[in-house]
Image: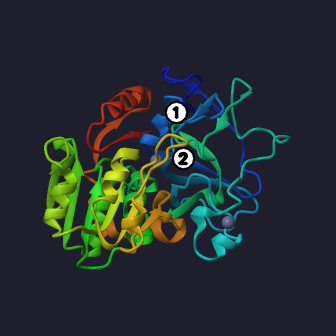
Amino acid sequence: MKAAVFREVLQPQTIEDIELDAPKGREILVRNVAAGICHSDLLFFEGTWDHPIPTILGHEVAGIVEAVGPEVTSVKIGDHIIGCAGGPCYECRYCVMGRPIICINRSHDRPASDTPRIRCNGAKIHQYGQLSGFAESMLIHEHACAVIPKEIPLHLASIIGCGVATGLGAVFNTARVEPGASVVVTGVGGVGLNSIQGARIAGASKIIAVDISTDNLTLAEKLGATHLVNAAQVNAVEAVREITKGGADYVIETSGSAKVAETSFDMLGEGAVLTLVGLPPHGTKIAFDMTKFIPSEMSVRGCHVGSLRPRIDLPRYCEMYLTGALDLESLVTQTYSLPQINDGFARLTKGTKGRGVVVF
Ligand SMILES: [Zn+2]
Ligand SMILES: [Zn+2]
């Protein structure tokens, strides 16, 4: 079967024949139908973050279960699934308290002494995110996915796995926006557009999109933003404070820029919550004014993949699409065949709007 093998930083991925082992124990074999190209894939491709190579990137993936190992209990052949990078254990104290995204036992890799899950010409290919979605099939642990309704088209379901789950979950699970609140989203790309949709679904009254791209802002308006602030043209803090009459109840920061995060802090009103979603380079630090933070009882929360609870949230987000609350079509602005994957990465570096999806 074909896969896009990533062998060297900043060098085009090569389409090669790979072999997957048969499922053992709690492993499942999935025929991939679609995989979105996420900004996090690009961070590995560019070498900002490290991963052993050769590998196969892709962690925003949906497909159909084709085979299951003898100990699998939660998934069956024919199920439609969305992949979850580094599936939770569902047993540690964080999983038990309902926060599987901070699970402390996320490794479901085979032991080093075992045969590798993925090989190419007999040599091991490192599995990325315990998924490796830019391949026609993947061999994963049953915890590294969630079963979803069969009614949702899989090329749309794929983007729920990371970008949509992160943007919506930041609003629903991490910030917990209540109806009538004012919400600012700084950066309305793949994740931020979904926080805009989440704020709309949550019943926010003012939904303010802040970005420097007019294309992104136009799409944000289509998805539910009530106010658009072009930070390249106006002072975004002043604009937000004017629209919200003194500061927003919630700010969701998705750009991953330390400067934008600090600016976002200045957009907060009394008792407001800043949710940091966008991932910066390792070691990035930000500074807040404590004399403002403490008397105003502000909060800053970290949000990883929308505080995702895979088996609850992923089917729920699919239902939101099926009932018409969630717009996924507008987000998928480009599809690629597997051999076109490097075009998809090149397009992402230009910061163009919406999501590119590889369809197998
Ligand atoms: Zn756990
Ligand atoms: Zn991602």
Q: Amino acid at mark 1?
A: Thr
The residue sitting at the bottom extreme is 179
Judging depth in this view, the residue of 197 and 5 nearest the camera is 197
Determine the quadrant in which ligand 1 lies. bottom right
* Front position among marks 1 and 2: 1
Residue 225: image location, x then y, percent: 18, 61
**Residue designated by label 2:** 31
Local secondary structure at mark 1: loop
Which residue carries the number 1 mark?
Answer: 48
Q: Which of the image's four quarters has the N terminus?
A: top right
Q: In the figure, residue 174 lies in which quadrant?
A: bottom left
Position of the C terminus, as image quadrant, is top left
Q: Which residue is drawn at the image coordinates 18% and 41% (left, top)? A: 232
Q: Residue furthest top?
A: 11
Q: Position of residue 13 (x, y in %)?
A: 50, 25
Decide which of tag 1 and tag 2 comes sooner along the chain: 2
Residue 8 shows in this picture: yes
The picture places residue 267, in percent across and down from the top left corner, at 27, 61
At horizontal 14% and vertical 47% (from top left) the residue drawn is: 234
Residue closer to the observer: 253 or 139: 253
Q: Is residue 113 above or below residue 201?
A: above
Query: Which residue sits at x=40%, y=31%?
Result: 345
Three-letter amino acid code at the position of disc 2: Arg
Q: How is the image coloured?
A: rainbow
Q: Looking at the picture, does residue 249 appear above or below residue 133?
A: below
